[in-house]
Image (cartoon, rainbow, N blue to C red):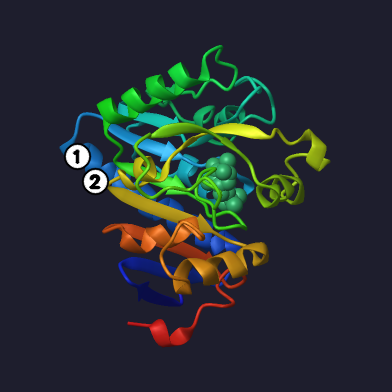
Amino acid sequence: MEKEYYVDRLKIKKYSSRKEMGAAAAVEVGQMLRHLLEHKELVSVVFASAPSQNEFLDGLRNYQGIDWSRVVAFHMDEYIGLEAVHPQSFAYFLNDRLFSHVPISKFFYIDGCAQNVEEECKRYEQLLKEYKVDIVCMGIGENTHIAFNDPHVADFSDPKWVKVVDLDEASRRQQVNDGCFERIEQVPTHALTLTIPALLSGAHLFCIVPGKNKAIAVQQTLYEDISELYPSTVLRKHDNAILYLDAESASRVVMKDVT
Ligand SMILES: N[C@@H]1[C@@H](O)[C@H](O)[C@@H](COP(=O)(O)O)O[C@@H]1O
């Protein structure tokens, strides 16, 4: 690691490469999981599903000493209309990258094909509240969304923990740029997402944000006023949030913030 910074309460760690960043985040999440498992019977974790998480997830699945049989997992969003077995669903992504490699106790799916989406939102909200979120492993989108809380639907005081949202064009375009879909018309228009209060309910937030396409979003996250116009700015208010950057995503971070 090169440097550690704070902007408000958000701790920022910058690494020279994407690989190094992912490996370091994996070690710190692994250590946190082991630590919590020493004190708790069950630990619950919310995971993001995006290529930005690949190096981190690779590292985490190889991290030794985690009793995965006492870990329950959630994901933070799912497209409406895609089943968990669909290769472009977020549930599939996490099964592929992590849960098919570790003996997880339980992975709770958001059902993107639920007949009654409002009921599905309530069911998932209840589960999140029942298990209480210990750790959130997340990304930040090019438009500064967290989960699928794009600026036009983000609400820092959302009364709901899970809701239906329409995706803005920047979000859908990013899915194509990330290689998840070939054309924007193929990207679903709606999703179920954890809201901002649900994400912030996590006791420990690990935000993994590599790549040059995130440089502006990182700059906005750190230096814009904290508001729903830039949803990820809310991370600066959380007591235990760490932002992991590589040289590319940190290219617009101002060094005078070094503490
Ligand atoms: N489904 C993903 C989330 O799980 C992810 O946290 C977020 C940020 O993703 P990324 O880091 O790729 O920009 O985008 C989408 O909402």
Q: Point out residue 78 in the picture as x, y percentages from the top left corner.
A: 57, 31
Q: Point out residue 175 in the picture as x, y percentages from the top left corner.
A: 70, 45
Residue at (20% x, 29% y) in the render: 41
Task: Find disc 2 in the rendering and name its residue.
Answer: 35
| Above or below: residue 232 compared with residue 155 | below
Q: Please say if the residues under marks 2 and 1 sit with CB atoms less than 8 Å apart.
A: yes
Q: Quadrant of the C terminus?
A: bottom left
Taking the image as drawn, is residue 44 in sight? yes
Residue at (66% x, 48% y) in the render: 171
Badge 2 amino acid: His
Q: Quadrant of the N terminus?
A: bottom left
Identify which residue, 118 or 216, lies in the foreground.
118
| Above or below: residue 84 compared with residue 160 | above
| Above or below: residue 29 compared with residue 160 | below
Identify which residue, 160 or 26, lies in the foreground.
160
Task: Find disc 1 in the rendering and name its residue.
Answer: 38
Badge 1 amino acid: Glu
Element at badge 2? helix
Residue at (76% x, 46% y) in the render: 176
Q: Point out residue 10 in the picture as x, y percentages from the top left corner.
A: 35, 66
Quarter of the image for residue 63 reads: top left
